[in-house]
Image (cartoon, helix red, strand yellow):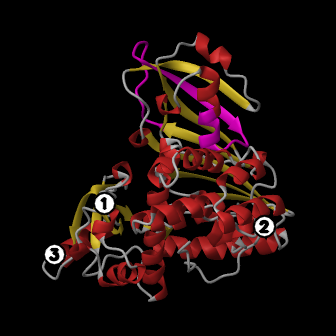
Amino acid sequence: MGIEAYLTDGDGFGGRLRASPADFVVEEATSAKICDSGGFLVIMVRKDNWETHHLIRDMSRQLGISDERISIAGTKDKRAITTQMMSIYGVSQDDLKKITLPRVEITPIGRAGRPILLGDLKGNKFDIRVAEIRTDKAAAELAAGHISTGIAASGGVPNFFGYQRFGIRRPITHLVGEKLVQGNLEGAAIDYIARSFPGESPENQDARGYVWETRDFRKGIELYPLNLRYERAMMHRLIEKPGDYAGAFRALPGTLMRLFVSAYQSYLFNKMLSHRMLTGRSISVPEEGDRVCFCSRDGVPDVSKTEKVTARNRQDVAYLYKRKRVMPVLPLVGKKTNIEDIDEAGRQVLDASGVTTGSFELPRIPELSSAGLWRPTTLQVAPSLTFGEGWVEARFFLTSGSYATTVLREYMKADPRQME
């Protein structure tokens, strides 16, 4: 997944995330404007152990509408209790009575003239219990104190895309995205449908293995369990129109389809950030050749405003850094990314990947093309930790696009499979 380094040296306290969904509670904070009129019904959804895309698909089916009419500001963890805002176009409060899904609470909160969008998400509040820690309470407190000191001295934790961005049991999304960017639509589709991983059930591995070897999609429909709904949808399309791999991807919900290329961009970002750390460079102090973004007075980064650090302006950048008004950024590479704006280490990672900025123009599925953008290298966070015998509770707020597992991995130093 491109996550190849820790910021801090000390041993963590280990443990396991999500021993139960109630151990991982997420509450969304949005800036969406709600009123009494408009074509979009705005709702607050509290879900327990639901994958976001599956929930949207099932809600749309019960409402009898396209899932494209349901909009969100961001996806949420599956194995968790999460609260988030959604908008639904062209439905009334009475229509919500049609939704009878288990472990889902829906509260209408108003209407809006436009859908809820990604930019409406300010961030998320996390209340997380880490179970089964490998040390006693005193040792856990000591280890966490050392780690917190290291994080504060470094200006935050590395802003990696977390494990769930790629999948832990089946880390496939960025691999599919890589083949899409390379123009290998058939390989991308077969990877998503049939590439198996050891973390899956034996039944799923056997079913995928059969299709991987035979490309027999009709038999695959018989073998694949109903919960592999997206793979089944792609196979149905390929039975109807053999060889239409672009159409197979279009059989998926738009939010899921767009995730693949985005996940590959995230993988490249993680590789670039790891390279920076492994070569001993600071993740927070700007250096000549870096690109920085500017921050508001309360420290919120604005990645739409960036500048390259040069010999001419480095003293000015250093002055702003001391006042927490700039921070280094790395690219989520896209078709409009200027290769000259990427530092040498980043260009090495991109060269090794075998793709170019132009690869992110996808003529056969143009809706998946990506212009690219910038992402801060550092995630500023100071968790509040409470310790008990066998457990640790962590509370913190993260801005949108950041991952709780990125913070907790520094403290836990645990196998990623314990963090799914």
| Residue 279, horizontal then vertical, whole percent | 44, 89
Residue 189 lies left or right of residue 304; in this view the side is right
Mark 2 and mark 1: span between their CA atoms? 42 Å
Q: Which residues are magenta?
A: 30-57
Task: Answer left or right for 323 relative to 209.
Answer: left
Residue 332 relative to residue 315: left or right = right
Q: Residue at x 18, y 79 (%)?
A: 310
Q: Tag 1's secondary structure?
A: loop
Please provide percent x and percent y for residue 257.
Answer: 49, 49
Which residue position is annotated with label 3? 313
Magenta-drawn stretch contains 38: yes
Task: Where is residue 48? Give x, y as percent.
Answer: 73, 39
Q: Report, in whole angstroms, how far the alpha carbon at label 3 lies from the one at label 1.
A: 33 Å
Per the image, the residue denoted by label 1 is 361
Look at the image and tell me whether residue 292 can be seen: yes
Q: Which mark is residue 156?
A: none
Q: Nearer the viewer, mark 2 or mark 3?
A: 2
Q: Nearer the viewer, residue 5 or 245?
A: 245
| Residue 45 spot, x, y in % from top left | 62, 30
Left or right of residue 347, residue 62 in this image? right
Q: Earlier in the sequence, mark 3 or mark 1?
A: 3
Instruction: Mark 1: give few (<14), some (14-19) or many (20+) Cα within 10 Å.
Output: many
Mark 3, mark 1: which one is toward the viewer? 1
Q: Residues within 10 Å of mark 2 (few under 14, many from 20)?
A: many
Distance, label 2 to label 3, CA atoms, is 45 Å
Quadrant where the N terminus is found in the figure: bottom right
Quarter where residue 227 is shown = top right
Q: Inspect the magenta stretch and tell me whether residue 22 lies in it.
A: no
Q: Can you see residue 419?
A: no
Residue 15: numbered disc: 2
Q: Would you identify the image quadrant in which residue 363 lies?
A: bottom left
